[in-house]
Amino acid sequence: MSNVLVTGSNGQLGSEIQSLANNYPQYNFFFTDVATLDITDLKKVEDFCLTNNINVILNCAAYTAVDKAEEQTDLCNAVNNTATFNLATVAKAQNIQLIHTSTDYVFNGMNHVGFKEDDTPNPINVYGKTKWLGEEAMKKINPTNSIIIRTSWVYSTYGNNFVKTMLKLAETRELLTIIADQTGTPTYAYDLAKTMLDILPKVTNTNVETYHYSNEGVCSWYDFAFEIFSQTQTNCKVLPIETKEYPTAAERPLFSLMNKSKIKKTFDIEIPHWKTSLKNCLEKL
């Protein structure tokens, strides 16, 4: 039986892994968050992994408050970069498999076809920059049998996310204006969590490899909101607006669609369409 450390276990992805844990009896899970394991402290990570004989680390921890990150630069960097360096360092020293999650925001959005894994990152906000630095640190340390999975627009029945926000706002509003010129793909955290657990035994690469994972299809935030209300038969009208009409502290990439051919081919997996996965999530909610 393999001992699996899951960081950020109270977040959306970590919570979904917890919900699936009983389906994977071959793994003995250690679910942690900042209160039980400070992954920005190298010594604490070393001690935890040694004490518990950890074989696999699923790093689901991240600083994801994109706008706040523009001010809380040090904290964002500590969680997204320093902590990744620490986990990779320990994984290398103790021969631990590391699956690290990153983001579509490592790209600048200046593209018209899906970003591939070997496209050059060029983040345009602090959040994206710190996630990219974490990726680079992990690649440099290069723990064996370890991968990076970039994902996008994550939502779940757990935590705070776009789906829940839309449903809550619709309770008191008849009209919402939603950005229509930012394009990408939503990711149901349940699907990503299951994929991570399913592919674990198949990750046997010598050097750190990067993969892209989101649900299939493409949409704007406006399309996403429209579909949420359509599937739930919510009587709330949605109007499209441009990014310039909704200024935020952090700049967002206008196009962040990712090509998922590599992960599908390498691990022989099928990925659900985003509308199908949204339906599954809404049924649980």
Image (tube, helix red, strand yellow):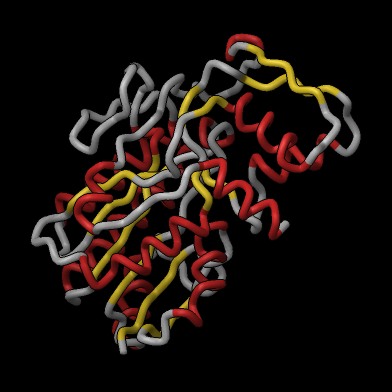
Residue in the foreground of this view, choosing between 83 and 223 = 223
The percent coordinates of residue 169 (x first, y second) are: 81, 36
Q: Position of residue 246 (x, y in %)?
A: 65, 16
- Report the side of 285 relative to 9 (left or right): right
Q: Quadrant of residue 239?
A: top right
Q: Is residue 9 left or right of residue 82?
A: right
Compared with 285, 132 (above or below) is: above
Quarter of the image with the N terminus in it: bottom left
Q: 238 above or below 202?
A: above
Q: Is residue 236 left or right of residue 80?
A: right
Q: Is residue 272 above or below residue 240?
A: below
Q: Which one is in front, 274 or 208?
A: 274
Residue at position x 64%, y 58% in the image: 158
Return the x and y of residue 54 as percentages of the image width and height.
Answer: 31, 81
Q: How many marks?
A: 0
Location of residue 248 with respect to 217 vertically, above or below = above
Q: Residue 119 location, x and y as percent?
A: 21, 30
For this orientation, the residue located farthest to the left is 206
Image quarter hosting the C terminus? bottom right
Task: Tell me the residue at 46%/52% (across/down).
Answer: 62
Quadrant of the image occupied by residue 2: bottom left
In this view of the protein, which residue sits in the foreground, 231 or 245? 231
Q: Residue at x 23, y 53 (%)?
A: 138
What residue is shown at x 47% (from left), y 71% (from top)? 37
